Image: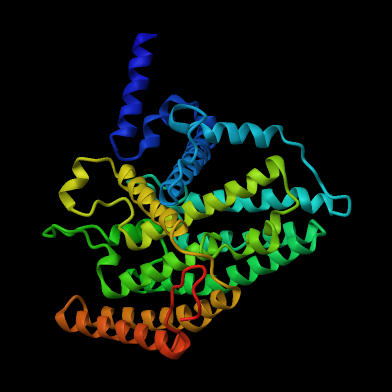
Amino acid sequence: MMEGLREFCGMIWKVLSDQPDPKAAFLPLVPEAWRVEVSALLSVLPILMVFPALFALTTVLERKGLGRIQNRPGPNRVGPAGFLQFAADGIKTLTKEDVVPRAADRVLHFIAPLALVVPVFLTFSVLPFGRNLVPLNLDAGLLFFFAVGASTELAIFMAGWASRNKYSLLGALRGIAQMVSYEIPLILSTLSVVMVAGTMSLPAIVDAQAAGSGDLLSRWHVFTPWGFAGFLLFLVAACAEANRAPFDLPEGESEIIAGYYLEYSGFKFALFFLGEYLGLFAACGLGITLFLGGWHAPFRFMEAWVPSYLWFFAKLAGLVAVFIWVRGTLPRVRMDQLMNLAWKFMLPLALINLFAAALWHFLGSTPAGWAITTGLLVVSYWSLGRILMPPGRIGRRVYRYAGEGPA
């Protein structure tokens, strides 16, 4: 028995120490007739365990971080320093009554939250989390990611339509208009990476960003002019796709109460909440894979010290912290501002960035390549900004105290 336990602990250590092909340590112990099913289970279980746990931790950290930004304590009652607040919230949603409106379509009302969560879990299957840690290695993994993720728009419309509530329907229509509008610059921002890397395989894109034999710094795409611009476009579009502030118009509680999930309570509401955060994690994971080198360290010599999957999750934590910071800093935009930003600014800039990536492909990392692509993007950014928001439209802000007359 002790020998078997020692062998099992050795296999666990091989996985945690970032050895090649982690499944090979477990599959020889499984009967040959079951190896296909066990292999699939070993790919699915970590996703079903790690990311919901990360969701629970993120909700607490976000609420505490927003509390610090807004000069208030945040959750501080349940558990040590309030870090078990997610458990209390989970118990509350599980025990809360599931209220369904009398006029609602009960079948669609039940299916909508499931139709939102399941596709998001599928998007994680093509993300490379570390060296040889790809649940599903597809040659067109990027295409699979966007094809599966696009089905969440149907789930949002189902939720708004099935509730038979005008506020819910308005929130659903807002959400669909926003997601369709920002999906275009989101996809275009990733095409520049596909053009330069020459593949839609996500592990191959990560390998293309590895440091060369004589390089000290990794070749992350974000270290190039077109990559930096594409990464910023990707972040803004991903923020809008995840309905995060300042783009949380579909659930604007000051206008339409709670948006498309107004008529949801209990566990169904928790599924919508989970789906939005998992969508944010998936978008961050894709941004890490395309622009931040995936599981590669910033410097080549660091990869021997820290397992590859820890680099991936460290970058994921950094991007999530940026989204929390933005939520606590920027106010919600208006609907016309939301659409103007997508169609009049981000879409033209994403197309110009494709042209900049094509120039970089022919000019390479030369002084001419850096100067031409950087100049093109800076001039385009300035010109589009002047067209969209000319100086005459922004008046001088005047501050007055209560009781004072007009300035």
Q: Report if residue 158 is visible in the image.
A: yes
Residue 70: x and y, percent? 45, 51
Q: Residue furthest left?
A: 214
Left or right, residue 74 beside residue 308 = right
Point out the image quarter for the N terminus: top left
Query: In this rendering, does residue 285 appear at all?
Result: no
> In the picture shown, does residue 345 fall above or below 100?
below
Please determine whether, in this image, residue 387 is positioned above or below residue 50: below
Q: How is the image coloured?
A: rainbow
Q: Residue 176: give x, y in percent of width and height.
A: 65, 68
Task: Answer left or right for 305 relative to 187.
Answer: left
Left or right placement of residue 349 versus residue 331 in this view: left
| Residue 381, image x, y percentages | 36, 82
Residue at x-position 57% and y-position 59%? 149
Question: Which of these two is toward me, 389 or 345?
Answer: 389
Q: Residue at x 46, y 45 (%)?
A: 72
**Residue pushed farthest right?**
102
Q: Nearer the viewer, residue 54 or 130?
A: 54
Q: Residue at the location (84% across, 54% down)?
A: 105
Residue 393 in picture, x, y percent from top left? 47, 87
Which quarter of the picture shows residue 202?
A: bottom left
Q: How many marks?
A: 0
220 above or below 109? below
